[in-house]
Image: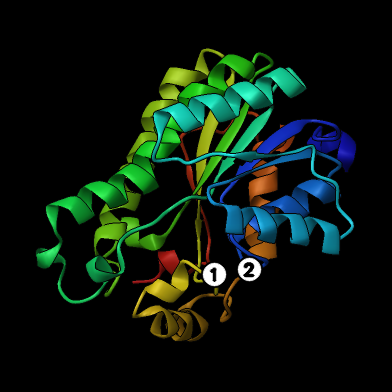
């Protein structure tokens, strides 16, 4: 299988591990199983402690763990320069970063503040563009960038509010980045994950309702796991999907196809 994936000893940057339930951690586990070199970025010191403990508890070895604040161009530039200098070539980037202020996920969308809207867009959508731009000079052998989206980008999901609009911008950004980066054989795709109990999901008031609806109405009649999201992301990072770019791939038990 490793021969098919062609990820053994490839350098993959994983952004957005908050704890063991993170989608980014599910991706990291899949990458370790494929023999990849995993490089983690973190935003704050408390995240560094959690990542370090996760790596240690699972007997993994990180190629690097690098500080990176996605709201800062300078921090992004410094992080990718540090990674590029250390490993030479970056073969893939997993962007699993999204955030909105709690008050903008409660009540009605019409009451979203100007600052809240800008912050959600900056953290959840623009950060992909900025990360891609900083990673590109080191992706000299081509490669793959994968980000994480959600059905709320395309449908109205109660309580998702400003994050739905940010994810819509993220999905459009995937398509435009795919065009820009394709000439350098860099692919850009998104995984639209079903409802998974992550730290970010806790902030969405209607999350438990979404879990029940997927169990009751999806073709597979169950929710998906971070491991399943991780394995699909692994495929998008790998040689298996070398002809795929600009796509939104749903991993949600088929819930998105239902009327």
Q: Is 47 displayed left or right of 227 in the figure? A: left
Percent position of residue 141, x then y? 69, 16
Q: Residue at x 47, y 79 (%)?
A: 214
Marks 1 and 2 sit apart, C-alpha to C-alpha, by 5 Å
Percent position of residue 248, x then y? 46, 46
User: Which residue lies under the disc numbered 1?
Assistant: 198
Q: Give neighbour class at mark 1: few <14, some 14-19, many 20+ (Cα, 10 Å).
A: some
Frontmost residue, 150 versus 120: 120
Which label sits on residue 15? none
Q: Residues at badges 1 and 2 in contact (C-beta under 8 Å)? A: yes
Q: Residue at x 55, y 20 (%)?
A: 136
Above or below: residue 27 compared with residue 139: below
Q: SS for tag 1?
A: loop
Q: Residue at x 63, y 48 (%)?
A: 233
Percent position of residue 61, x then y? 85, 46
Frontmost residue, 226 versus 21: 21
The quarter of the rendered structure image containing the C terminus is: bottom left
Frontmost residue, 114 versus 176: 114
Residue placed furthest toward the left: 110
The quarter of the rendered structure image containing the N terminus is: top right
Snapshot quadrant of residue 137: top right
User: Which residue lies under the disc numbered 2?
Assistant: 21
Residue 128 visible? The answer is yes
Above or below: residue 16 compared with residue 71: below
Q: Is 58 displayed left or right of 259 in the figure? A: right
Q: Earlier in the sequence, mark 1 or mark 2?
A: 2
Q: Give neighbour class at mark 2: few <14, some 14-19, many 20+ (Cα, 10 Å).
A: some
């Amino acid at each position: 299988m490793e021969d098919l994936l062609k990820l053994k000893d490839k350098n993959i940057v994983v952004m957005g591990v908050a704890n063991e339930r993170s989608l980014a951690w599910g991706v990291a586990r899949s990458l370790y199983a494929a023999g990849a070199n995993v490089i983690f970025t973190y935003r704050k010191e408390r995240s560094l402690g959690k990542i370090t403990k996760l790596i240690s508890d699972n007997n993994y070895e990180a190629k690097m763990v690098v500080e990176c604040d996605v709201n800062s161009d300078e921090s992004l530039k410094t992080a990718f320069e540090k990674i590029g200098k250390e490993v030479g070539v970056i073969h893939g980037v997993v962007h699993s970063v999204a955030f909105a202020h709690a008050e903008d996920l409660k009540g009605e969308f019409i009451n979203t503040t100007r600052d809240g809207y800008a912050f959600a867009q900056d953290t959840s959508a623009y950060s992909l563009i900025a990360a891609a731009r900083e990673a590109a000079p080191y992706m000299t052998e081509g490669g793959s960038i994968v980000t994480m989206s959600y059905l709320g980008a395309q449908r109205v999901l109660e309580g998702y509010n400003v994050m739905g609009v940010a994810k819509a911008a993220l999905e459009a950004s995937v398509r435009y980045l795919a065009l820009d980066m394709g000439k350098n054989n860099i692919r850009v795709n998104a995984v639209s994950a079903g409802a998974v109990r992550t730290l970010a999901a806790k902030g969405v008031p209607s999350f438990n309702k979404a879990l029940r609806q997927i169990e009751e109405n999806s073709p597979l009649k169950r929710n998906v796991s971070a491991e399943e999201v991780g394995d699909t992301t692994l495929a998008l990072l790998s040689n298996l999907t070398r002809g795929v770019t600009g796509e939104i791939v749903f991993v949600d038990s088929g819930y998105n196809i239902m009327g």
